[in-house]
Image: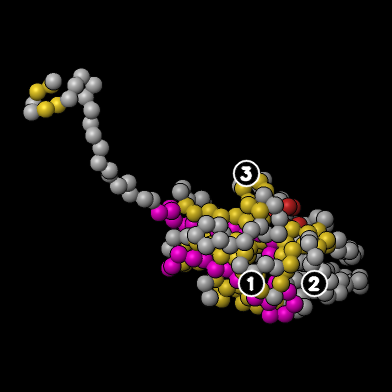
């Protein structure tokens, strides 16, 4: 069984410098190959009418995916106005095909760093968070790892940076209970670098609705003015 040897075609954006770490295996095993990772099935999600939704194409531009969902370009967080990154990480893109991805654009642009942080202003409630990633650095397991935290709580610990292999799409999906008005998602590298290609936050309950406040108004009669029970 032949194992293809990939040559990264990562191109840094701006002035960031990128140096791939790890070594791509070049040996050809004999016998039957045994996968070193387990594919994680993508969780299904039923949209909730009127629920909060935010999609950010991390490191990339505005994008409409194959399900006609809009993803906004990467942007800085503006309290009370715009969700986005708190830490400005190094941005990269690759021209390599990302295996398992129906939306190549969402994975080919990405950021890397020791800490990657995105913040969202939203109402208290339950939310589903999806992190989209691809491994462009590591040729085998054990070369890098990171934690995923939400509002200070560790939800994913020691995630191996090999993910599902070299240039394969990988999604992490989890639920978060927000008790305040902010969701703060942070990827913290334990070894090597953390990476993120896109982030999606969906509300699991309808968004809050405002109650209309009646305002005083005058009622005019087209035939005249009402006074003392008589039309004049």
Could you tell me how far apart the alpha carbons at marks 2 and 1 are, in whole angstroms? 17 Å
Badge nearest the viewer, 3 or 1: 1
Whether residue 199 appears in magenta in the rendering, the answer is yes
Q: Residue at x 52, y 72 (%)?
A: 151
Q: Where the N terminus falls, by quadrant?
A: bottom right
Is 92 above or below relative to 139?
A: above
Q: Main secondary structure of the magenta part?
A: strand
Q: Residues within 10 Å of mark 2 (few under 14, many from 20)?
A: many
Count the marks: how many? 3
Residue under label 3, please give it: 68
Residue 116 visible in the shown view: yes
Quick check: 120 left or right of 37? left
Q: Quadrant of residue 89?
A: bottom right
| Placement of 155 over or under 218, stated as above or below | below
| Magenta residue check for 190 | yes
Q: Which residue is mark 1?
A: 187
Which secondary structure, mark 2?
Answer: loop
Q: Position of residue 84 (x, y in %)?
A: 60, 61
Query: What percent of the width, then of the height, locates residue 19?
Result: 84, 71
Query: Which of the two labelled residues, at mark 3 and mark 2, occupies the earlier sequence position?
Result: 3
Q: Position of residue 52 (x, y in %)?
A: 49, 54
Query: Alpha carbon of mark 3 to alpha carbon of mark 1: how far?
Result: 28 Å
Q: Is residue 6 left or right of residue 89?
A: right
Circle 1 Cα neighbour tier, 10 Å, few/some/many (<14 / 14–19 / ≥20): many
**Image point 86% across, 63% down: which residue?**
8
Q: Secondary structure at mark 1?
A: strand
Name the residue: 53% across, 76% down.
152
Mark seen at residue 138: 2
Q: Nearer the viewer, residue 213 or 165?
A: 213
């Amino acid at each position: 069984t032949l194992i293809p040897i990939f040559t990264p075609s990562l191109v840094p954006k701006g002035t960031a410098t990128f140096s791939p770490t790890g070594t791509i295996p070049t040996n050809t095993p004999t016998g039957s190959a045994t996968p070193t990772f387990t594919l994680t099935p993508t969780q299904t999600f039923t949209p909730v009418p009127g629920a909060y939704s935010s999609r950010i194409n991390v490191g990339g531009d505005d994008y409409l995916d194959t399900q006609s969902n809009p993803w906004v370009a990467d942007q800085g967080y503006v309290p009370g106005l715009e969700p986005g990154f708190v830490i400005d990480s190094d941005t990269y893109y690759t021209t390599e095909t990302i295996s398992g991805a129906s939306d190549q654009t969402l994975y080919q642009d990405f950021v890397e760093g020791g800490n990657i942080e995105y913040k969202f202003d939203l109402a208290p409630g339950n939310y589903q968070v999806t992190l989209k990633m691809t491994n462009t650095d590591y040729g085998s397991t054990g070369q890098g790892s990171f934690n995923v935290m939400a509002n200070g709580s560790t939800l994913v610990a020691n995630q191996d940076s090999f993910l599902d292999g070299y240039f394969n799409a990988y999604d992490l999906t989890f639920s978060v209970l927000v008790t305040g008005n902010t969701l703060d998602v942070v990827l913290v590298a334990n070894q090597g670098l953390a990476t993120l290609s896109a982030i999606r936050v969906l509300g699991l309950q309808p968004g809050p609705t405002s109650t209309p406040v009646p305002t005083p108004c005058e009622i005019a009669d087209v035939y005249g003015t009402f006074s003392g029970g008589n039309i004049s």
